[in-house]
Amino acid sequence: MKDDITIFLNEQDDKVYVRVPDDKETHFELQNLAGKILQEATHDKSLHDFDLTGLEDGIYFVLVNQGSLIRSKKIVKGYHP
């Protein structure tokens, strides 16, 4: 069940994509390292994206809440070792 939610950063278009199971209302949040909510949305579509254009390089967290299923992932923008 945990693998039903996919979160990934596409550096080519500077967006984070979140894929969830269809037809379930889902709450999406993008937070900075301090926990401040930068973007949020609630809908029942299977794909959501956060546009990181204009945000500073650094660490962000994507939180996905779909009923009893909650998932988070750390996103690192702009660091290329």
Image (spheres, grey):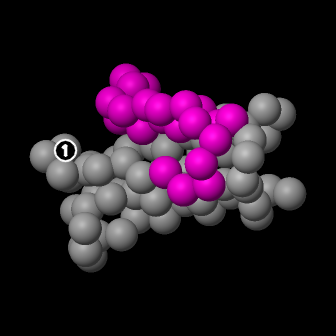
The residue that appears at 73% across and 46% down in the rendered structure is 23
Q: Secondary structure at mark 1?
A: loop
x and y percent of residue 51 in the render?
29, 50
Report whether residue 6 is seen. Answer: yes
The N terminus: image quadrant: bottom right
11 versus 60 height, above or below: below
Residue 69, quarter of the rendered image: top right
Residue 67: x %, y % from top left: 78, 32
Any magenta on residue 38? yes
- Relative vertical location of residue 79 with respect to residue 2 in this rendering, above or below: below
In which quadrant will I find the C terminus? Answer: bottom left
Q: Is residue 60 left or right of residue 69?
A: left
The residue tagged 1 is 55
Q: Is residue 30 left or right of residue 7?
A: left
x 33%, y 59%: residue: 15
* Main SS, magenta residues: strand
Q: Position of residue 36 (x, y in %)?
A: 37, 23
Whether residue 75 is visible: no
Left or right of 79, for residue 62: right
* Foreground residue among 42 and 69: 42
The picture places residue 43, in percent across and down from the top left corner, at 58, 36
**In this picture, is 25 found above or below 34?**
below
Task: Identify which amino acid the numbered label 1 is placed on.
Answer: Leu
* Magenta residue span: 25-48
